[in-house]
Amino acid sequence: MKEQAVIFGAGNIGRGFIGQLFSESGYEVIFVDVDQDLIAALNRDHRYHLQTVSNTGVEDYHIGPVSAVNGANSAAVAQAIAGASIAATAVGANALRFVAPNLAAGLALRSAANAGPLNIIVCENLHGAAQHLRDLTAARSSEPAARDYLANSVGFVDTVIGRMVPAPTPDMRAADVSFIKVEPYKELPVDRSGFVGTIPTISAMHAEDNFGIYTARKLYVHNCGHALLAYVGYQRGYTFSYEAMADDEIRAFMLAGLRESVDGICAEFGADPAWLYSHVDDLLLRFANRQLGDTLYRLGRDPLRKLAAEDRLTGAANLACAAGLRPRHLAWGIAAALLFAPTDDNSAQELQRQLREQGVAATIATVAGIAPENALSALVQEAYAVLRATPTALPKV
């Protein structure tokens, strides 16, 4: 029998990335989810259709063997964890609190059976996600033996997810509820220090000692580039990322902002600029993927979170400032984010309320932690005033 891998979450990243890697590595994959239609399809077919798409072609894969259990069935989830050789989460940071009780129950079964170590790859867009899940799980572990097993025999491993996986459209789901369309990019850097025991061999996974550089690259290059593209593209009325990438002014603006970010990362982490610029070159091709159909709405939604002090725009700008730079283009990106106002994005509407009631300086102090006396605040306010008057304006590069 194949070794088993348990993945909490059969959504975009669970099915669209981690499930593929575990399957390619020889594991039988068990998904934990609450989508009844998806669970039924996975248990009926024991595989699912994954398609990689790019401007150069399409490739089809059938990922299996797979099965699924309902997250509401605590006993079944615990049994799956008890028999797993490796596990992962891909549920969204806010849903980790629902994972913890079932995970704790499964680890208690492993402890009682004197099972070997278990490593859990935590694929969540949250700084310190692995420690957060460990803490949540520990709070649900009451037996001394189970707490000891958790402390000494369970690895919680941080990673950064670079693959872009837009949500399936209603038409795609109606045709095949388990179908997922993704970009071909396949790299899974993980934090070596999070593992317990032998690090398993997983397709496309590489364990890194200086993991902070990979986190910075993902947040302040990949995510930052997406944010710059989304917020200025929205101002010009574009829908898809590839449309914004085809606008020469936006492309040049985004590259200028990424240069500021790269300089800040190099100063803070001692990163090799050639390595980071190679990643930028790769992203330019990936962001222009017409077949993926990635929307600026997806890239820009929830601006309150994306403007936070350590997140993609403000965090990158702060690194640049600390390096003695004047991050004008990153400041312009922050200002454009303040104008992102889709009516169905509650975060964006809350941001607009704060701007109306508090003004720009107070809002960016509250939302982004940029104090009014900070030079960055002046840069953002200057850009915001220009964009309010001329929404399609961009700074000269």
Image (spheres, rainbow, N blue to C red):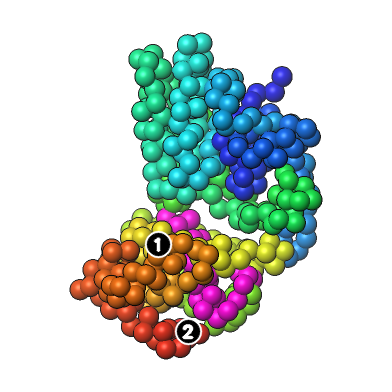
Q: Label 2: few (<14), some or many (≥20) within 10 Å? A: some
Q: Confirm whether the magenta stretch covers residue 262.
A: no
Residue designated by label 2:
391
Magenta-highlighted residues: 216-242
- Expressed as whole percent of the image width and height from the top left, the position of residue 163 reads 60, 53
Q: CA distance from mark 2 to mark 1?
A: 20 Å
Mark carried by residue 256: none
Left or right: residue 112 compared with residue 61: left
Q: From the viewer's perspective, is residue 383 above or below residue 56?
A: below
- Magenta stretch, main secondary structure, is helix
Kind of residue sitting beneath label 2: Pro
Is residue 25 visible in this depiction of the protein?
Answer: no
Is residue 129 visible in this depiction of the protein?
Answer: yes
Foreground residue among 320 and 384: 384
- Expressed as whole percent of the image width and height from the top left, the position of residue 164 reads 60, 56
Residue designated by label 1:
304
Q: Quick one: label 2 or label 1, which is nearer the N terminus? A: 1
Which quarter of the rendered picture does the N terminus lie within? Answer: top right
Left or right: residue 95 compared with residue 36: left
Q: Secondary structure at mark 2?
A: loop
Determine the residue positioned at 28% across, 64% down. Answer: 366
Determine the residue positioned at 54% across, 49% down. Answer: 161
Kind of residue sitting beneath label 1: Leu
For this orientation, the residue located farthest to the left is: 373
For this orientation, the residue located farthest to the bottom is: 389
Determine the residue positioned at 70% across, 49% down. Answer: 180
Residue 66 found in image quarter: top right
Q: Label 1: few (<14), some or many (≥20) within 10 Å? A: some
Determine the residue positioned at 63% across, 54% down. Answer: 167
Q: Secondary structure at mark 1?
A: helix
